[in-house]
Amino acid sequence: QVQLVESGGGLVQAGGSLRLFCAASGRTLSTLLMGWFRQAPGKEREFVATISWSGVTTNYADSVKGRFTISRDNDKNMVYLQMNSLKPEDTAVYYCAADRRFAIATAWSQYAYWGQGTQVTVSS
């Protein structure tokens, strides 16, 4: 089993920055594909970013490309999402996700393990 715990969410003004943290346990992080997803009220869960086992390959949703950066520290069992130039439409619950697959995946159904989520609210 893999346990994921997110933190770092909060309230920020438009244009500001936040850094989300995902602490993983239960399996060696270097053998997990990691991703971030988000879900706003009344909307479906959507892909934000993903990072390969080694951290060499990343993929982003078009809506966050150039503003968000996903990274990982396998030695510390941590995954990060640096969010800059935040917009009100970025407001959502952000979820950390993991899967044992090797190939990059952007669909939420491709991830087996999920954290409880952390709220990000961006005020205008």
Image (cartoon, helix red, strand yellow):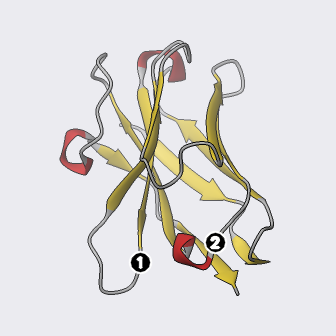
- What residue is rendered at 72% in x and 26% in y? 76
Task: Tell me if 85 is positioned left or right of 25 in this view.
Answer: right
Disc 2: CA contacts within 10 A as few (<14), some (14-19) or many (>=20):
some
Q: Which residue is mark 1?
A: 40
Does residue 71 sit above or below 80 in this rendering? above
Disc 1: CA contacts within 10 A as few (<14), some (14-19) or many (>=20):
some
Task: Tell me if 114 is positioned left or right of 120 in this view.
Answer: left
Q: How many marks?
A: 2
Does residue 58 sit above or below 120 in this rendering? above
Instruction: State how far apart marks 2 and 1 are (Cα).
Output: 13 Å
Mark 2 touches mark 1? (CB < 8 Å): no
Does residue 121 sit above or below 80 in this rendering? below
Pick the quarter of the image with the C terminus: bottom right
- What residue is rendered at 70% in x and 18% in y? 75
Q: Position of residue 59 (x, y in %)?
A: 44, 32
Q: Position of residue 116 (x, y in %)?
A: 47, 64
Q: Position of residue 105 (x, y in %)?
A: 29, 32
Residue sitting nearer the eye, 112 or 106 = 106
Pick the quarter of the image with the N terminus: top left
Q: Quadrant of residue 86?
A: bottom right
The type of residue carrying mark 1 is Ala
Residue sitting nearer the eye, 105 or 28 = 105
The type of residue carrying mark 2 is Lys
Please tell me whether mark 2 sits on a helix, a strand or a loop.
loop
Q: Position of residue 74 (x, y in %)?
A: 63, 20
Please tell me whether mark 1 sits on a helix, a strand or a loop.
loop
Task: Tell me if 45 is positioned left or right of 94 in this view.
Answer: left
Q: Which residue is mark 2?
A: 87
- What residue is rendered at 41% in x and 38% in y? 2
